[in-house]
Each structure stands twice: as structure tokens, then as C-alpha cells.
Image: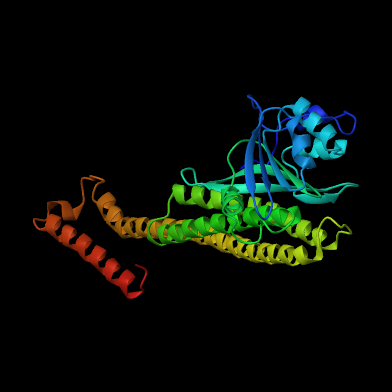
Amino acid sequence: MKFYRKGISRKIGMPPGTLIHTGETKSGDISIQAMIYDEDSCEEKQIVNIEELEKLVALNKNVWININGIHDASIIEKIGQMFDLHPLLLEDLMSTGQRPKAEQYQNCLFMVLNMLWMDKREKVVESEQVSLVYRDNYLLSFQEKEGDLFDPIRNRIRQAKGKIRKEKCDYLCYALLDIIVDNYFLILESSGEQIENIEQEMISDPDTNTLKQLHELKRNMIFLRKTIWPIRELVRSLERVDSTLIRPETLIYFRDVYDHTIQIIDIVESSRDILSGMLDIYLSSVSNRMNEIMKVLTIIATIFIPLTFIAGVYGMNFEFMPELEFRWAYPIILLLMVAIGMTMIFYFKKRKWF
């Protein structure tokens, strides 16, 4: 999870539409996969030559083109020229760390989202930017690297499950948006389990590791809130968009995604309140434990104050001290000191000071 992105400073002073990748430095080739489907058939292709894409779009079928890797500006520029994409659109999809948004261009709809997943070993939320470009019978999806959450969608297309093969690409756009948003519930479920474990630790024996876990969870919730609020606006703007690209019968599905975002926001806000309360409880618990320790030490010191005074008086070794030559002086002084200590302990217990 990264709140600050490297490489943005390189774009300062550049003209609009300059293609500069601002994410993590990557190497290697960009891979492109395509799925061509309609109600009766489905075909998958690994694209080696970019010029093949024009032939696919010319087919009278739905085409989903997935581009893994956005670090090569020359390839992104070629794809933009091939599909007549606006330079600002290409600039946005190469600039990772974008705020989730939806924009309508003259010939297409453009969406930027964050695909999140939980690193179960490190217990932190990882993020990857996904950009969707939808126009007529094709949809382009741009990802930072290979590996995503879209395998269930691919399987539904292959096996002709549900409505996805019978609908146009606006329904595919909804399906990708829906699976990204629904995955946030898995992250919240994992975070909820962590919160329950931390609550048990706080009751039994809170330590610095507990505080570290609380801090990480709060960062995760802040990042989730930062991600999901713009998606709520994104879906709402799609409902209001004046375009023929999204059919009226598909809008109801986008409203369902909107409902999911509202649920996630409610859960995130509740979790943030719980974590804030847990942090206060942790600080109070540590403070109370310190107070208990100080109380015990204070009681011990208080008991020994009069005993130390008596020992100090008879440790002065003056020549003319009448008790020094008394045969039973030593055991009497010891008994007196024990009696004083026991009396003070009894008094403290009676006052319920410990």
C-alpha cells in the first residue's frame, strides 16, 4: 500500500498528453490477450503483433483486449493511435496512483480503478491500478502487471454462464467493475478477523506488537476509504452519463455496484471507529498497568519509611543510648518494626488501596 507515488515529479512542466510512466520501474515486454465472443462462440488469442488488434475489432463480435503492462510508452501510443484514444486518456492510464474516476470522451468511456488484495503474510493491502476503455463492441483493460481478479469473468465467458455472452460490452464493463468492488469485501473480512484477534490480545496482554498491528489496520482502512469513496462517485456518474454506450437495461446493474460501495463505506467507517476506540483502550490499558505497578511500589516504599526511620535512629551509634545496653532491645525493636509493617498492610487493605 503506497500513499505516495514516485515519478510524478518527472511530469512537471511537460505538455498535456505526454506519455510518462509514473509507477514502479518495470522491465520486460507488454503482454496482450484478447477474448472474442458472442452468444454462440468464444475464442481466446495471445496477441504478438499489435496490428492484429484492428482485425479483431472489425469483427461483428464483442472483443475484450487485456493489456498487461503500461510501462512502454511507444506501445501505449500505438494502441492509442489504433483506437483513436485521446492523449489525455493515455496520459492518465500511464500515471499510476490516479484517483478512481470515470470520464466520457467523444468516442469512448474511460474508467480508472484500484484493484486491491490482501497480502496474507504481511497483513497489508496491496494495490494495482486498472484502466478500462469502453467503446461500441470492444473493451480495453490496462493493468500494471500480469495477474488479476478477472479469472471468474473469463470462466463465465468460456463456459457461457450467466448473461455475459448474450450482452454487449457495457455488461462486461459492469462485470469487471463489480468483481473489483466485491473483492473489497474479502479485504474487509480479513481485516475484521485481525480486529477480533487484536481485541483478544488487548484483553489478555497488550504489547508493542499490538500497537503496530493497530497502526497497520488503521492505514489499511484509510487507504480503503480513500479508494472506495471515489468509486461511489464513479458509479453515480455512470448513471448520469449522457451516452448511448451504456444501455438503460445495464444501468440497473451499475446501481447494484453503487449499493455495494455504500455497504463497504459503512463497514470501513465502522471499522475505523472501532480501531480508534481500540487505540484509546490500549493506551488506557498501558496507563492502568503502569499505575498498578506504581501503586505497588509506592505501598512497599510507604511501609518501609517508618522501618527505615527506626533503623536510622538506632544506627547512629551514640555512646549514651540507653536501649543499646538493654538485653532485650534488639528483639523488641524487630517485633516493633514487624508490628508497624503489619498494621500498615492491614490499614491499606481495609482502605482497599490494594
> Nearest the camera: 203 or 230?
230
Q: Can residue 263 be seen in this view?
A: yes
Question: In percent of the image, x 73 and y 55: which residue is there?
Answer: 231
In the depicted structure, whether residue 82 falls above or below residue 278: above
Judged from this view, the residue extending furthest toward the left is 327
Q: Estimate the x, y position of residue 219 in percent, counting from the top left.
A: 60, 49
> Relative to 74, is 39 on the left or the right?
left
| Residue 73: quadrant of the picture | top right
Question: In percent of the image, x 87 and y 33: which residue is there?
Answer: 17
| Residue 69: quadrant of the picture | top right
> Nearest the camera: 192 or 299?
192
Q: Estimate the x, y position of residue 64 in percent, counting from the top left.
A: 70, 45
- For the N terminus, the quadrant is top right
Q: Is residue 132 visible?
A: no
Q: Estimate the x, y position of residue 136 in percent, counting from the top left.
A: 81, 50
In the depicted structure, whether residue 253 falls above or below residue 132: below
Q: Estimate the x, y position of residue 103 in percent, counting from the top left.
A: 84, 50
